[in-house]
Structure formats: C-alpha cells, structure tokens
Amino acid sequence: MKLKICGMKYQENIEAVAALKPDYLGFIFYENSPRNFEGEIPKLPSAIKKVGVFVDASVDFIVEKVKQYDFKAIQLHGNETPRFCQDLQGFKNLEGLDLELWKVFSIKDQFDFNRLQPYEGIVDYFLFDTKGKEKGGNGYTFDWSVLKGYPSSTPFILSGGIGLDEIEAIESFKKRPESKYLHAIDVNSKFESEPGVKSIEKLKKMISNLEGFKNLQGFKKQPMNYQVNEKGYYGDFGGAYIPEMLYPNVEELRTTYLDIMNEPSFKKEFDQLLRDYVGRPSPLYFAKRLSEKHNTKVYLKREDLNHTGAHKVNNTIGQILVAKRLGKNRIIAETGAGQHGVATATVCALMGIKCIVYMGEIDIKRQAPNVARMKMLGAEVRPAKSGSKTLKDATNEAIRDWINNPVDTHYIIGSAIGPHPYPDMVTRFQSIISEEIKWQLKEKEGREHPDYVVACIGGGSNAAGTYYHFLEEPSVGIIAVEAAGKGVHSGESAATSQLGKEGIIHGCKTLLMQTPDGQITEPYSISAGLDYPGVGPLHSHLYKTGRGEFYSVTDDDAMAAGLELSQLEGIIPAIESSHALAIFNDKKFRPEDVVVISLSGRGDKDLDTYIDYFKL
Amino acid sequence: MNRINTALKQDKKLLSIYFTAGYPSLNDTAKIIQDLEQHGVDMIEIGLPFSDPLADGPTIQESSTVALKNGMTTQLLFEQLKDIRKSVNIPLIIMGYFNPMMQYGIEAFCAKCQEIGIDGLIIPDLPVNEYHEHYQETFEKYGLINVFLITPQTSDKRIRFIDDVSNGFIYMVSSASTTGAKSTFGDTQQQYFERIEALNLKNPQIVGFGISNNETFMQATKTAKGAIIGSAFIKHVTQYGTGNIGDFVKSIR
C-alpha cells in the first residue's frame, strides 16, 4: 500500500513532508481551492512521484503543467470524459512519458460501478473520494463498505477525510477482498494545521502506526540527513556561536560561499589547480599485501601523494579562491603540527597573498621543519603564547586576529570545525576525496560503493571528505578512528567521542573534551594532527545518530600500523593516517569486503617521531 | 525594577568596572565588589573565567588563566556571592562565555543568578539569534537582563534587531578589536559613536573595549550613557593589589 500526501503548497513544508519519503506528493491546480498551487516545487528525491491534480482543466493547461513540474501522475478531479482521458493518453504516448493517469469518482452513500466501465483501459487508477460540497478536501470519509464487490481489476486509491482516527478502519478494510486492488491511501486536510500546511508529527504518527506504511523507505531513512541545515546545524550540532565582532565576516561567508563555489569560473579554476598543481586525482591503490595480511580487500586513497603531502591542500586551494572572490588580501590560519599552515602558506605564495600562521609556542618547538617550510614560503609564523600554547590556543589567536582585522582578512580554517559555514565549506572542498573514490572504485571493482570507508579524526576534515558522498548510502559503513593517546582513560588521550561532552568550542556546538566546569582541556596524542579537544559537528552527529562507528587507537597501535604499512607496501604514512590503518585490531572485515582507507598524509614530517619511537 | 534599569535612569554618565573573579587571589571577589561600590562605581561586571576567551585581549586572558589556576569555578563563584546582597546594592552583571554556563545548565545558572541577586548577563559568544530562539524565555523568567554587543561593523538593521531584543542597555564595542587599551579614540570612533546616537535606540548604550583613563572615558560618554573599563582595572590590581581601588576610580572621573 502506497501513501499519497495531497494539497502541498509551501516550499518549506513540501521539503519537510518529502523527507518522510511518501510515494506520491499531490499539487492541486484549481483556483477555488485554498490549496491551489503556484510557484516552484523544490527539488525532491526522485523516488517521490509528483502528482498534478486538475479539475476540468484543458489538455493544453495540463500538458503545460506536466512539462513545467515534471509530474509523474495526473489526477482528474472534475467531469473529465473518457474521450478527454484518451486525449491525454495520446499526449503521453506521443511524448513517451512515464505518466500515470488517475480518474477521481466521488462517492456518498452509494455508487454505480457502471460509471467506471467507459474509463477501463484508458486510465491507470481510479481514486475514490468523498462526495461533498467541495471538489475534494471535504474532510470526512465515505462509507468504504460501498466498495464491497468492487467489480473492476483497475487498482484504486482510497481518499477523502482520512486521518489518524481512520487507522483502525484502514487496517480492517485491508482484510476485505476488495482491498486486493487498493493501490494507495490519499491524505490531505486531516493532517493539516492550516490549508496547505501538513503536520509532520501527525504524518509520522500515521506512518508508524499503519502496518502497510511501516516499510515506507522514506520513514526509515528520514532521520538520515547528514547535510547541514539552513541554520548551520547537523542535528544538534553546529551553529555559529561567535562574538558579535566576528558576525559580519562569518555572515559574509555564509551568504556567499555556496554561490561562489557554484560559479562555473570558480569550479574551473578549482578543478584545474587540483589537477595541475595538487596532482589530483590521487590514486586509489589496491594494497595487495595489506589485504592478504588482514584477509579483506583494502584500498588506500592516496592523499599522501598530494602536493604538500596531505589532504589539507584541497581545502586551502578552495578557500584561497573564495578569499580572492571576496576581495580579501590578507590570510590568517591556525596550525597544530604545521601541515595546514604549510598548505595555507603554499596557496598564499601561489596567489601572492600575505599569510600569517598562528602556531602554539610549544608546537613551534616540536615542529621546526614545518615552521621553516612556512617561512620559506613567505608566511609569517606567529607564536600563540596563551593558555596551553598548542593548537586550540593557536585557533583562539587566529580568531582574535580576525576580530581585529574584520575587513581585509580571510581566515582559512583547516578542519571541518568552527562556526557555520566553515564545517560545511571545508567538507565540500574535501569531498573531492569521496567523489574520486566512487569512480575509481567503479573502474576497479565495478561498483561505486565500498563496504566501508575508514578515516582518522582530529577535527575531521579528511574524514568528512572521505565520507561525504557515502553519507546517505546506508550500504557503506562509515568508520572513524580517533586517537586514544596512551589509552582512552589514561588522562592523556584525544578520543573526543568517548571523553567529550556537548559544548561550544571555536564557534560551534559539538562534542568536546572539558572539565565538569566547562573549561576546555588539553588533549594528547603522539600525532600532532589529532590532538584537538573537539571534533567537527558533522562527526558529532554521525556519532550520536549511530551512522558512524567510532574507534579509538592508542599511540602504540598506531605506530605499529604505520610500521606495518611501511614494510608491507613501501608507504610510510603520517602518524594521523596510521591511526586509521590500525582499524584491523578492532574491526574484523569479511574477505569479500571492500574497505577504503583514507591515507590522509605522508610520514616525512613524522620521521623524528618514528625515529624516537622505534629507536631507528 | 531591575537594578540595571534603575541605574540607567540616573541623570549621569555611568562608570562600569569589569574584573575577573578569582583574580588576583581566589577569594578577592566580594571585597572587590564592595570596594567598587564604596568608591562610587555605578555597575560591576563579574568575569567568570574561561579557558578559551576568544573576545579578550592579553590582559583579561592572563587574568582568566590565573583565576582558573587559583581554582575558580562557576560553583565557587556562586558560593562567594551568596551573601553579596547583604552588603551591596550596585547592579551586578556576570560576564562569561557560554560553555561554562551550558555545563552548569542554563536554567540552573539563571535560577542561581536570581537567587543571589545578579541583574544581568553578558555572554559574548551567545549570538542574539540563538538567544532569541532558545534562551530568552528562560533568562526573562529569572529576571535577568541579557546584554548584547554591537561593533562598528554591525549593520543598522542588525542593531535595530538587537535593540528590539534588549531590555537594559547595549554594549557598544568601541572598535574592531579584542578587549584591551587603546591610548585614544580617533575620528573613526567618534563617527561611529555619532552614527549610533543618531539611531535613537530605545536602549541606552554603554561603551566598552579600549577605555582606560579619564580621556577615553570622557570621549566615550560624550554620546553614550556610560563606559566599561576592564583591562585597565585588571592591570591596576595586578600592579597595586586590591588595596587602593579608590585611586583607580578617582583617576577615571
């Protein structure tokens, strides 16, 4: 049994109702109806068939609307003759359209079934509505026992005043022989708060209480929305908790970033730089020996082969192009280990834009080679001397710089964190990773969807990019690997999903490590790129909804996995990526599983740490 | 009537002082408040220290770090203030970042404020839209005035929205900056002060950020109802301790 929701009118409501994924959504073109539809229909999932409802309209009018709105069904609600219906069939055949034709019959206490006869074979469905003053939308049901002995084999739709009170009646109707031809239930006014506005709560109730609807694909899938909403939230997480001083900058970005990213000239420049400068597409490499070792099919997405040695540059290329279009001539960035700082300094050199990178005083000492690289690229590296003098403090300093330089400066945030629109913007720039995985896997395995995608998570930018095009695809398992440091509960860890509580960090509501009093604590990991006390809001949402499986990997297990990859495949990974590679300790895959692991960066920068650790 | 509104009705320019609770010593809070009232200050902002104060310059950052090291917490601040209304009548505002309040529980935090006799809150990282949508009802239920910031970059339209949502005063940030001293205000600031005055807002404005001495105080209050001093006061207690707060207040007006 299918569900049609009729009398849709308002954009937002249409979108909310569409999220329930009913089989049909009806749009009425009848001026006397309070639900008369005008305007645009937002883009709907292709599984939902749009139905145009007409009352004694001309063929030309109907044809025009079908073309304009891409209707998949026409519901004729007036005194349309069989001949009229035949004309419409002619149009349909002529255009080769996949179009269902529904003819409505209104029933009061009795019905002469002979009236159906002339329409048999011409229309695809009959719809039985309540006869009343109005053309539909009368708000009460007819006596369904009239349908007893239904003489036709044309499937029908039951309509007219169906509400939550009718659930029992529908269930019992379905037990009767005539229900064999029941194609769908059509609902409208009983689910409205006002004409044309459907109550999502009531619809959900209907769907979950009616046996036949429980399998509605949409209802099961409905909570699975992983895109940021218009207010900047992923479920409960995200938003823009920023001081007023930052509002104009962030607001400028929020109102322009999507338009800029969609400009053909932007796309062209972005794609070209990714190809010719970064060296994309990065290979999707079948790791044969690693696969044998772990008895499953492992592919590595080789972000380590990008220019500057990690995925970070995908985002900095994108953001520098945005900054240019916003007319900014000064770039600031924060960096922990220096990878994002180097990627930012690189694109600033490329574009000839002034670059200032904030880096914790302690990190500057720990990461001397990257500091030197940034300087060689012409960037100024400013030490963050406040608080714990590491990444979170560098981020604070960059934000303070932005407050003090609101007009000429763009802040290139390096991870999928910060106030909206940063998490979404960074995710979109990094989504090139999963975009490529899809077609590369298609070439190698004959399918676009792996069984699992695996990525390490600090703030979560490489993970967000690796997951992005698979988020709405339930067959693809999403695995996130956090840094457990010396053990999740050792007091020296960065396993945010395990240790974090909901709070505000750097302008967004997300999971973060903090004291009971709400002071943000200092995380620890052997990998400088993973020791961030928060996690991007998308990932908090994936964690909370259960869409993502989260694991924590200790320093020791990560280092062992890094060594294993080096010696099995001849690839020395960044220690961040080594965490993702350590997934095999915690998760057993089947031999036939296709597991794609994001190899987010190369290990050159970590050589000192590897040397110390392995006494090389 | 809320003490803030009463103070704003006075026919004079108001001097408001910010200090970080738990600084320089953990238990200075009540004494600083009492001294400030005694020396004729009109309003007090009690800073609830936070580990990551985004909107603050080096002076207040440092005082917050020290206060946290001293052991300051939200709970402790409420304990220190529990009898404060027995000794002072000055309007008291808690200024802090949103995360510690969230962790305490927004409703519990507001209820505690009312119980103690706190009159208002300033939360730089709680934007007006979020407040309006999710928290206004709770704040108002406990009689708290929430104060919003505006800056030279804030559009007239947004200022009018903030004016609409506010029911005390508007915190006018003097320039695009974090907290901390500027030696003087230039033409840009004057023009901004005049632009805001011309909007004829229903809420009076109090200027903050960059007020450090008599000169900047006078400049700021030429058009505005009052001014807030934070960093300069922190520097004073850092240098001279809490013994001669009166000297500082005298130097301002």
Image (spheres, rainbow, N blue to C red):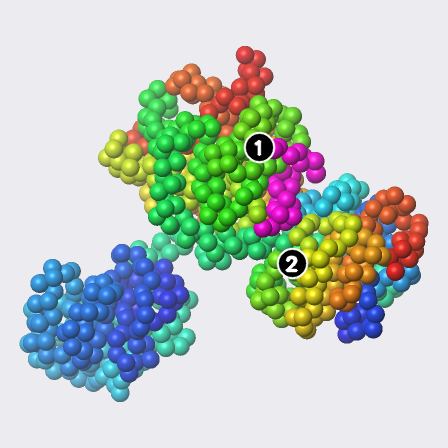
Residue A6 percent across, percent down from the top left: 29, 71
Q: Is residue A529 above or below residue A516?
A: above
Same subunit, tags 1 and 2: no
Q: How far is disc 1 from disc 2 in space, using C-alphas?
A: 29 Å
* Residue type at tag 2: Pro
Residue B205 percent across, percent down from the top left: 72, 66
Instruction: Inspect the magenta stretch and tell me whether residue A401 lies in it.
Output: yes
Q: Is residue A333 above or below residue B27?
A: above
Q: Which residues are magenta?
A: A380-407
Chain containing the residue with disc 2: B
Q: Quadrant of the C terminus of chain A?
A: top right
A547 left or right, relative to A530: left
Residue B194 percent across, percent down from the top left: 70, 66
Q: In the structure shown, which secondary structural element does the residue marked by tag 1 occupy? A: loop
Crowding at label 2, few (<14), some or many (≥20) Cα neighbours within 10 Å? some
For mark 1, what is the residue?
A379
Give A278 or A106, whichever is nearer the viewer: A278
Residue B152 badge: 2
Q: Residue furthest front?
A: B187
Residue found at x 45% / y 38%: A317
Residue B88's image quarter? bottom right
